[in-house]
Image: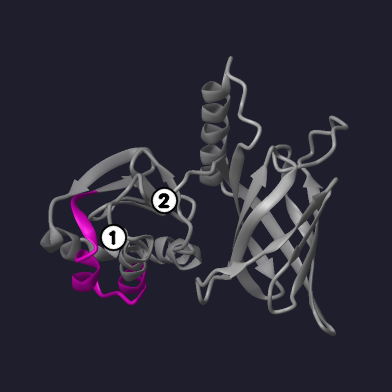
Amino acid sequence: MTALKLASRGLLAAALIAGLSGVARAADDIDRVSLEGTLGQERIGMTLLIKNGKTLSGGHYFYGRYLKDIPLRGKLQGETLRLSEAGGGEFQLRFKNNGGGDGQPLGFDNSVGLDGSWTLKAKTLPVALSIGDMAPAADGRWYQDVTEESDAAFEARVQGFQRAALAGQAQQASRYVHFPLRINHKGNSRQIADARQLQAEWSGIFTPAYLEQLQLAMAHDLFVRNGQAMLGSGVAWFDAKGAVALNLPD
């Protein structure tokens, strides 16, 4: 798990503690847990809805190549999670220890991820997932705190930026940017005023190292905070009109 991912998860945990201090959670409170990892050789993402930290109340997973939700149902039993999909595929997963050694039963709040297998008929593939963001599930659209447009339309904007950047299409990528664009690198921050400046400085921003991280980011079920959505582990942030900040690797 990257430092940015760990930091964002830590901020979320702190926010949850602060929000719940002195106030008992409702009996039907549901948390949304995001995971990502691999199924065989394929990269996948997964979103699960967990009631009271113990009961699975819904969820889905998706392949990084397709970004299409595959609904899941199943049960959380102790340290084991069993999930099934309509097409017959079944996950059997077990929580991984976070190294704390406190002797407490493992769960989403004290584990670094899940390992196990996915089986469909006679085919079995290994599965490895890291736990990312965990926050109270909100009613309504996923990106309702970011934009008034549909979730699909917003993600299409993010995906458009990602595709254009990876293809080196500076002019096309600029259409998905909300200028001024903030560039963060090695503790410093500067702004790109407009599309012309972005195109002029393209090679210094979209370096091979940055593009490698951008390639790995899955533009679906993005983490949302303060009215913006985060792509990957912070490779880019988006508001309702487009990319507003890029975080370049050191």
Say if 65 sits above or below 61 in the image.
below
- Using the image, determine if residue 44 lies above or below residue 246: below
Residue at (58, 32) in percent of width and height: 13
| Residue position marked by numbered label 2 in the rendering | 230
- Label 2: how many residues lie within 10 Å, few (<14), some (14-19) or many (20+)? many
Instruction: Give left or right: position of 70 versus 210.
Output: right
Q: Residue furthest bottom?
A: 122
Find the magenta span and give its range.
162-181
Which circle's residue, 2 or 1, is located before the other in the chain? 1
Inspect the image, locate mark 2, and give the three-letter code of the amino acid beneath it. Met
* Image location of residue 71, percent across then percent down: 61, 67
Few, some or many C-alpha atoms within 10 Å of disc 1 (few <14, some 14-19, many ≥20)?
few
Residue 30 is drawn in which quadrant?
top right
Q: Residue at 22% x, 55% y: name it.
A: 241
As drawn, is 122 to the left or to the right of 182? right
Q: Which residue is mark 1?
A: 204
Image location (x, y in percent) of residue 138: 48, 44
Callout 1, which amino acid? Gly
- x and y percentages locating residue 107 in the rendered image: 76, 42
* 157 sits left or right of 60 in the view: left
Q: Residue at x 23, y 43 (%)?
A: 190
